[in-house]
Image (tube, grey):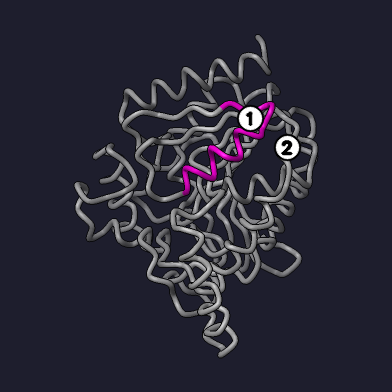
Amino acid sequence: MANSKLNPLPRLGIKLLPGGILDYVQTEDRKFIRYGYWEKGDKATVIILPGRTEYIEKYNTVIQEFLDRNFSVLCIDWRGQGLSQRPHGRIDIGHVKDFFEYQMDLETILENLKNTLDNRPKILFSHSMGGCIGLRYLLRDNTFKCSIFSAPLWGLPVSEFTISILIPIFNLVISMGLGLVAYPYKIDGFNILTKPFEKNVLTKNLEFYNEMRDNLLIDPRLGLGPPTLYWVKALNDELFKLSKMPPPEIPQLTFMGDLDKVISKKAIKSRMARTPLGELKILTNSMHEVFFETTEIKEEIWEEMDKFLNKIFPN
């Protein structure tokens, strides 16, 4: 149970999906991690791993789609974002020193809910940064039946030459004790408050964009600033390691928008090309938030999702 300074409920005005449980678990390194769990039959449980800057309530519509299909759902707030414990209590930076810290978050929640989850198959659903974390977890754990990736962060949308210049500079700055300095990343979670919809790189869905903006105005604790230099270095290290590793040996369905500028589309295509059990669906006229795009794109996605899941979980 969390300490007295943490409350799993967002402020009044944030939409809550009924029927769920919101609570905390504590990791070995004493971080309080928030999760939400919705029980719906024994068909399977979907484990949702959000991306950077995200939080459980953002996934209300996705969770409801799975519930409507008789899947139970577990969703988490990574350390340092949502209503999980923040580094140094700060919402203006996204920070870890090692991406394995996220593995601890997921492991701890799954272990704490083991008696609840182990009586049914598990499906991994992950978006963006969650796709990086989820891929690593699937390579360490063999209990998942299948996986769905949404615009997974398997590579950065910059050249290897740029990375070869930046990372040594970051290492030097970190060695000087300045690892908490923020990198001016273009997907700062608070940018949505000032960036006009027409210039955003996330979605063509105005209703969704406005809802995310309203949520930050109602409860700024859900926001997240740019990543620290430590975080960027940790991500780069993890992406390099994962690029050398084989695909998980389970069915995988990956969605990617053809207009995505947040992640490396080349890295996704490269990994899926060497994933025998994988399917890659490239969505026309879609940006990064594929599951929160226009109605037409969402309909296309869920049609593909039903085909994929019905093969694995036939009625």
State left or right for residue 264 relative to residue 209: right
x, y percentage for residue 34?
59, 55
Residue most toward the bottom?
176
Q: Amino acid at mark 2?
A: Pro
In the figure, residue 289 lies in which quadrant?
top left
In the figure, residue 61 lies in which quadrant?
top left
Q: Amino acid at mark 1?
A: Gln
Q: Residue at x 57, y 79 (%)?
A: 171
Is residue 88 placed above or below 86 in the rendered structure?
Answer: below
| Residue 52 among those drawn in magenta | no
Q: In the rendered structure, which segment of residues is drawn in magenta?
A: 264-279
Q: Residue at x 46, y 40 (%)?
A: 59
Q: Residue at x 44, y 53 (%)?
A: 157
Residue nearest the observer in this picture, 291 or 25: 291
Residue 5 can be seen, yes or no: no
x, y percentage for residue 117?
74, 36
The reply to whether callout 2 and callout 1 are in contact (CB within 8 Å) is: yes
The residue under label 2 is 248
Residue most toward the top?
315
What is the crowding at mark 2: few (fewer than 14 residues within 10 Å), some, or many (at least 20)?
Answer: many
Is residue 256 placed above or below 168 in the rendered structure?
Answer: above
Callout 1: SS? strand
The quadrant of the rendering that contains the N terminus is bottom right
Residue nearest the observer in this picture, 185 or 55: 185
The residue under label 1 is 252
Residue nearest the observer in this picture, 201 or 74: 201
State left or right for residue 263 relative to residue 191: right
